[in-house]
Image (spheres, rainbow, N blue to C red):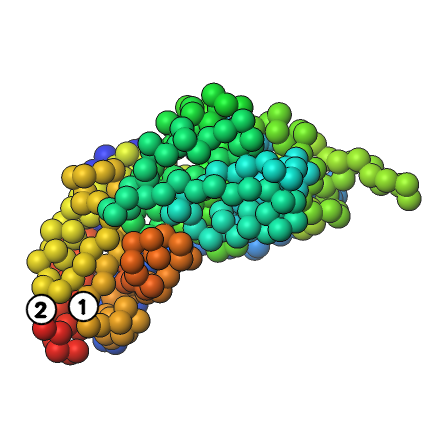
Amino acid sequence: MTEIMRGFDPDALRKDFPILARRIGGRPLAYLDNAATTQKPRQVLEAMREFYEQRNANVHRAVHTLSHEATLAYEAAHQRVAEFIGASPEEIIFTRNATEALNLVAYAWGLWELREGDEVLLTVMEHHSNLVPWLALRRLKGISLKFIDVDDRGRLRLEELTRLLSSRTRLVGCIYASNVLGTINPVEEIIAAAHRIGALVLVDGAQAVPHIPVDVRGLDCDFLAASGHKMLGPTGTGFLYAKRELLEEMEPFLYGGDMIETVTLEGATWNRLPWKFEAGTANIAGGIGLAAAVDYLEGLGMEAVYDHERRLLEFAWERLAKVEGIRLYGPAPDEAPRLGIISFNLEGVHPHDLAMVLDSEGIAIRSGHHCAQPLMARLGMEFAARASFYIYNTEEEVERLAAGVEEAKAAFRVRS
């Protein structure tokens, strides 16, 4: 794909995704678990296969042809990802996922820079990946954690931001878009407020980068983490963006091969960016596959991706709201900017049972606490079902979802 496909046809796109031809329980697969991971188009699979079949070799290790070609392709992948979010390639660190990228910040920056009494400000809606590392540093370093609350509709109480920021605040960590509610947070406002008092900002972009246009220069965030596998790329891929001056000052996260410049028995010096943070043999094919995924999304246009999801969200919200006994979480689509994610519960039916009924109809959704237990507790639930949409989902699949929820209600004889 080279030309932007304004108003793309999801039915046509589905032909690019081999797995969508599967049948589950005799029914066509309706894959509605995209917030967990997305399916992979042929273009991504073919790019990885071509690497393994034609130029499989380690990068930055040798002068032979295969290694040279592999190195060029892997470095070009960094360039493509950087262009996708408005960064420079030396500011893009390839990781296994957003979780590793967030941990990289916690341990390569936080472990070395934070002191007892320093404050890290987070939100109640953080994914565990941007909470648990800071809980660990609280034990290790004696830092203080503060949290911006949400209202009963799952929107950040931004009036708390000014109150919670202080001269001791060193870092603000904020999820760009909630993986439970789909709520898109006003990160620009949060970043500006944090910078006014001299704090850095770490943005968890795992849900945002695959679905909306993201420009790190425009945001002026200091760090941004993303998962490749949530944006059509292979599993085991993700990346961290960080401002170059921060990466230059930070210590490495992992130590070993390829991240060094020189090594003696007395010490070592580090490689140039971004390789200073990419120790050992990389997931080369994965990085090349991620670049192919970026090409695919850019061919569609990220505004078009978001517009498609927003239409599906509005249709699904209206359709599911008609089911008696259902509770939809988060603000309605006309109340706040949202991604195509809907978490819900059905009175009298456990989310796991609901997911099993839907699976018997070929409909894949998520059920559980969605790695956001503090947010779930704040909204008064332990578990929830979640449907999440992407570029290849259709209104017909939404209709099947709603019908499946009605079927589960009947199967468990739920009375409103």
- Mark 1 element type: loop
Which sits earlier in the primary sequence, circle 2 or circle 1? 1
* Residue at numbered disc 2: 416
Mark 1, other Cα within 10 Å: few <14 / some 14–19 / many ≥20: some
Q: Residue 8 lies in what quarter of the image? A: top left
**Residue 49 showing in the rendered view:** yes
Residue 347's label in the rendered image is: 1
Q: Residue 184 lies in what quarter of the image? A: top left
Q: Position of residue 168 (x, y in %)?
A: 56, 31
Indicate whether 261 appears above or below 189. below
Q: Residue furthest right?
A: 265
Quick check: marks 2 and 1 in contact, CB under 8 Å? yes
**Which amino acid type is shown beneath numbered disc 2?**
Ser
Q: Position of residue 395 (x, y in %)?
A: 15, 53
Quadrant that contains the N terminus: top left
Q: Is residue 232 left or right of residue 21?
A: right
- Mark 2 element type: loop
